Image (cartoon, grey):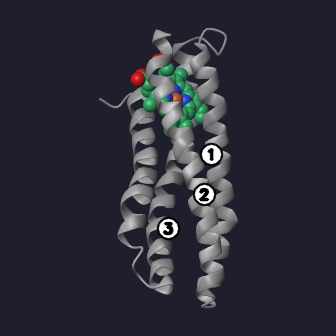
């Protein structure tokens, strides 16, 4: 059944799972391709993945705040794990928005001008920030699951 918690958890699975797939599966599998091909491939992949993440960055706070205020009676009654998740969630969202509007846009405009080494530099930046979000997302999800028991 679709509840705020299930939507919240499915969003986390798609976001964190997508980052794991990009980092650990797709990246090593396409490393042998020429730089220009890799850039075009990553633009296509990230365009599609980021359009889903945009939905998630609205769903996660919306369902999270719903649970906090409608079900738990506010942050003062929610566990410390929820306060920590809230803070880390906003760091993840800020990093995502920054990646989307700065390195990702730059990478696309460099690729349009066929400046592939420059586009590659922005791709490295995106990879680094996505790794940070992957670590944060894994920590937040673990914290969310074990938080009520500690
Ligand atoms: C942006 C602000 C966020 C708020 C206000 C929020 C709030 C909450 C609340 C109230 C719960 C229920 C906790 C409980 O029942 O003890 C929850 C569960 C959860 N949250 Fe968040 N959350 C946020 C962001 C995130 C993010 C960014 C992730 C991971 C990417 C995440 C992953 C999870 C998971 C996996 C659960 C389910 C834990 C379980 O019941 O096993 N949350 N969240």
Lower position in the chain sequence, tag 2 or tag 1: 1
Pointer 2: what residue? 128
Lower position in the chain sequence, tag 3 or tag 1: 3
The yes-or-no answer for disc 3 within 8 Å of ligand 1 is: no
Relative image position of residue 6 (x, y in whole percent): 38, 30
Q: Is residue 118 left or right of residue 66?
A: right
Q: Residue at x 48, y 37 (%)?
A: 138
Mark in the foreground, 2 or 1 = 2
Q: Residue at x 38, y 38 (%)?
A: 10
Residue 11 to residue 23: above or below: above
Residue 22 to residue 57: above or below: below
Q: Is residue 48 left or right of residue 85?
A: left
Name the secondary structure under disc 3: helix
Pointer 3: what residue? 47
Name the one closer to the observer, 63 or 99. 99
Relative image position of residue 15 (x, y in whole percent): 46, 47
Asked which quadrant contains residue 82, the reply is top right
Pointer 1: what residue? 93
Work out how far the residue at label 2 is from the one at label 3, CA to CA, in angstroms. 17 Å
Q: Residue at x 45, y 84 (%)?
A: 37
Q: Which mark is residue 48?
A: none
Q: Is residue 5 left or right of residue 58?
A: left
Question: Could you tell me how many numbered marks the image carries?
Answer: 3
Relative image position of residue 47 (x, y in whole percent): 50, 67
């Amino acid at each position: 059944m679709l509840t705020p918690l299930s939507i919240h958890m499915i969003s986390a699975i798609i976001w964190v799972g997508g980052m794991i797939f990009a980092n650990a599966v797709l990246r090593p599998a396409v490393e042998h391709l020429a730089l220009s091909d890799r850039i075009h491939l990553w633009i296509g992949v990230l365009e599609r993945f980021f359009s889903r993440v945009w939905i998630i960055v609205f769903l996660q706070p919306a369902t999270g705040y719903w649970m906090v205020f409608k079900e738990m009676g506010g942050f003062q009654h929610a566990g410390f794990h929820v306060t920590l998740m809230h803070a880390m969630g906003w760091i993840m969202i800020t990093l995502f928005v920054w990646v989307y509007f700065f390195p990702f846009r730059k990478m696309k405009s460099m690729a349009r001008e066929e400046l592939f080494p420059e586009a590659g530099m922005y791709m490295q930046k995106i990879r680094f920030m996505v790794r940070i979000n992957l670590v944060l997302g894994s920590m937040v999800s673990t914290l969310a699951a074990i938080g009520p028991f500690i």
